Amino acid sequence: MRPLTSRTQHATWAILTCALLAGIAAPASLLAADIYTLRLAGHDFEIPQRYFQDDVPGWLRWLPGLDDGSRDALLTIDASEVAAAVPGFKPKDGGYIEDLRVRVVVLRDYEIPRYLDSKRRFSDIWNSTGSYSNRVIERDSETGLVRVYRAIEYPWSWEVFTVSPETETLSSDIFSFWLGHCLNGPSPISSTGYLAICHSHMVVGDIAMHFTVTGQNIDKIHRLRIYLADLLSQWLKKQ
């Protein structure tokens, strides 16, 4: 949210001061317990306050003039809450707590194909061309998932698929086979001394949800997408 202008700040404090002096609590509609109401690019969302990690009171977001036309919001879902909803999700790796960090973005029309066009994104991987001309392909012995690396980035950066580009044709449904992109590095708090952070996303209509997990939960991406789609349907107010 953008900083308040001087004029808006004066109006805000005037409202607060008058309310405090009069002994009046903020209106119930503003204090609706634990709900933030946000407007992102024409969509209204009602999202539980616990998912926001900033210090702005929920009712203050309701004050007039604070809608800055933003298209995105950053949320954090507690690892224990995710684990209770998604079977098999591991809430921690050593000392690293696996809270689910989510960025909700309302896409512009021209952006949607970028998220959905598997050929545009993965044709080099499937054809072993471009920066993937010397691709390295590995199959995880535990999960059966396939990792594909650029040779120059091996073994620190890779894409994760449910199928191998060596044996399967490239599907037009990107979410049917692609799970995420991972980066691995040293970590003093993980159980192995290394931690792979994996970025993924999903799209519902014109809304994308970006999220991160660690490598130990990469095989739960399909379930996490279903979980997040369900949350989104709860948060999004019907037009």
Image (spheres, helix red, strand yellow):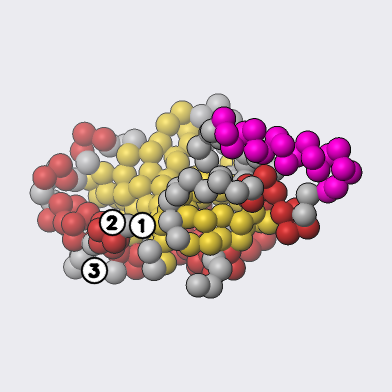
Q: Position of residue 104 (x, y in %)?
A: 47, 53
Residue 171, numbered label? 3
Residue 19 belongs to the span the image colors magenta: yes
Where 167 sits versus 103, above or below? below
Q: Secondary structure at mark 2?
A: helix
Q: Residue at x 15, y 52 (%)?
A: 124
The three-letter code of the residue at mark 2 reads Glu
Whichever of labels 3 and 1 marks the residue nearer the N terminus, that label is: 1
Residue drawn at x 51%, y 29% is: 187
Q: How many marks?
A: 3
* Residues rendered magenta in the picture: 6-25
Element class at badge 1: loop
Question: In the shown orientation, is residue 103 left or right of residue 118?
Answer: right
Left or right: residue 133 versus residue 71 is left
The amino acid marked with disc number 3 is Ser
The residue to which callout 1 is attached is 107
Q: Is residue 143 visible?
A: no
Q: Amino acid at mark 1?
A: Leu
Is disc 3 surrounded by few (<14), some (14 to 19) or many (20+) residues within 10 Å? some
Residue at horizontal 19%, vertical 68%? 169
Q: Nearer the viewer, mark 3 or mark 1?
A: 1
**Where is mark 2, residue-wise?**
111
Q: In the displayed structure, would residue 119 be above or below residue 55?
A: below
Residues marked 2 and 1 touching at CB (< 8 Å) = yes
Place residue 178 in its image quadrant: bottom left
Real-space CA distance between mark 3 and mark 1, rounded to the nearest whole angstrom? 23 Å
Q: Is residue 180 or residue 11 the one in the foreground?
A: 11
Which structural element holds mark 3? loop
